[in-house]
Image: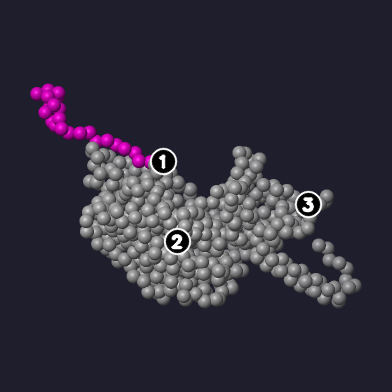
Amino acid sequence: MDEKTVTVQDTNPMDTETLEVNFGPQHPSTHGVFRMNIVLDGETIVSVKPVMGYLHRNHEQIAENLTYAAVMPYTDRLDYFNSMANNFGYALAVEKLARIEVPERAQYIRVIMAELTRLVNHVSVIGFLLNDLGAFFTPVLYAFREREKILDIFEAISGSRMMCNYFRFGGVKRDVSDADLEQIRKIVQKFPAFLDEFEALLTKNEILCMRCQNVGVLPPDLAVNASITGPVLRASGVNYDIRKVDRYSIYERFSFRIPLGDKGDVYDRYYVRILEMRESVKILEQALKGIRPGEFIHPKSTSFLKLPRNFKPPVGEAYGRVESPKGELGYYLVSDGTPQPWRYHVRSPSLINLTVLEDLCVGHKVADAIIILGSIDIILGELDR
Amino acid sequence: MIFGSGIIRGMFVTLKNFATSYFRKPDEGGLFTVEYPEKRIPLKERFRSFPFLVYDGTPENLRCTACDICARECPPKCIYVVRAADQDGRPLRRPAAFTIDYSVCMNCGMCEEVCPFDSIFMDHEFEIASQDRYRELVYTLTKLLKSNEYFNNIRPRDAQAVDKKRREAEEKKKLAAAQAAKPKLDEPPKPV
Ligand code: SF4
Ligand code: SF4
């Protein structure tokens, strides 16, 4: 039997060839410069290889050549949707390293800012998810209408809409005026009504349900093993929120619940975010009630803010983490007693949450890969650093 | 529930938003588009764009002493300060050249925070787009200098606080000088 006949016998005429498709790096559905190398069998996904690094800008190395204070504006640029949460994590890490105390009012301001960015992030992420589903820009614009009000507050308080650079070691950069607090109160008061409207538009929408339910199911044990954090983990039903686990800052003073999903599909991830926003509103209401006049920065830290080169934390290491809207955002710092960090590392939730992309996508149709990616909620600035 | 009722409810939401956007106030979901550049939103006082240097009275009377602190602390290192010298080569407390590369500046406001002489502050000017990165966006001393009145104009609260602080420091210095001058009248003046 010669070779030719063997191949003829082994080939099934109904077999199709797989097709390799590159999504990105310039594709609107990848939320930035990110490439998915997808192998398709017909419309069904056989494998997904994420290719990243297009936005790598050496964040950690740059930080190791700067003073501790000068790293703060760079952290804004990690997750450029939530600069306040990034500032928060870094400030916590340095405060832990140098054992700096934070006055009461500053803690309240920090919590208010962190929860406001959670609102900003979750509304826009849901808006973009709907964009990926094909509801072109109506939900996004509703979300952006609300986001804009919060960004106006950020601009009035910190000076910049997105690159806030607002937190300082031992407090915050400037005080929040009563007028700003009043404005925040107004926004917080109206936010539940907006969420009701948003839900009326989306939650029971049959198209959304059919597209999202049972798609991209993340089983809880895989989520834990892959160290997924944030809303993606909680949508799989694992009760883990750093605000509750670590009780950093003053989160133990507020009563709020952790919403959990039960299936871990795209729909749960969407709905957990809606519920989280409702809980954030609760925290904000309590924080706005509890905030009292006082110092917005510890008097001892004002001295080294003027002279960042005199700020030399003792030799040692510290890991500070916050529940950023995307998951556990951690900063690891090693000090050798010089004004510059000897080692600086960022544990970015976007990167680690993305590691399960292939497990979520395989077996689904190619159009589902886009919404699965959208529901994981990645930000390329943080993913590539 | 009947299949499709969710979509119909959603449609009502969009319809309601469409209709009420004509009646509601801009911050309550009404039409909020501002037709830039004909119309503008007033800037917030704390808004920061790029740094500028303040002078009192005349541009010769600038506050910067060329101490180089802002240049060292600037995270992307986009400030370049050259100290002036007199004929004998002794350094003077003023800059000969002060350059900020606006295309590198990341609007962080660090320079404003660290300057010990209240000289550098963040501006409100943001329409600086140009076609030539090197000729237009590298700002030299003449382009950077702006008067204290301008500063008071754009950021009244901050400027007044700075002015107050400077006046107090001035008075303190005068008082101290007057006291120090009394017993040391017959001593020879120290070389500076
Ligand atoms: S602007 Fe301020 S910090 Fe910079 S060189 Fe002048 S005096 Fe020094
Ligand atoms: S604002 Fe920041 S980046 Fe710009 S010149 Fe000042 S310190 Fe440098």
Q: What residue is pinned by disc 2?
A: A117
Q: Is residue B186 left or right of residue A69?
A: right
Q: Crowding near pointer 3: few (<14 within 10 Å), some, many (20+)? A: some
> Whole-percent x and y of residue A63?
51, 55
> Whole-percent x and y of residue A289?
46, 75
Query: Mark 1 falls within which chain?
Result: A
Check contact, mark 3 vs mark 1: CB within 8 A: no
Residue A296 occupies which quadrant of the picture? bottom right
Q: What residue is pinned by disc 1?
A: A26
Q: Amino acid at mark 1?
A: Gln
Query: Mark 3 falls within which chain?
Result: B
Q: Is residue A23 visible?
A: yes
* Residue at image coords 86%, 76%: B183
- Same-subunit check for callouts 2 and 3: no
Q: Is residue A244 left or right of residue A362?
A: right
Is A6 covered by the magenta stretch?
yes
Q: Which residues are magenta?
A: A1-24
Check contact, mark 2 vs mark 3: CB within 8 A: no
**Can you say whether B24 is above or below B167 in the image?**
above
Residue A239 occupies which quadrant of the picture? bottom left
What is the distance, in whole Å, between disc 2 and disc 1 at their CAs?
27 Å
* Residue at image coords 27%, 60%: A236
Query: Mark 2 falls within which chain?
Result: A
Disc 3 under 8 Å from ligand 1? The reply is: no
Name the secondary structure under disc 1.
Answer: strand
- Same-subunit check for callouts 2 and 1: yes
Q: What residue is pinned by disc 3?
A: B85
Q: Amino acid at mark 3?
A: Ala
* Residue at image coords 34%, 64%: A275
Q: Amino acid at mark 2?
A: Thr
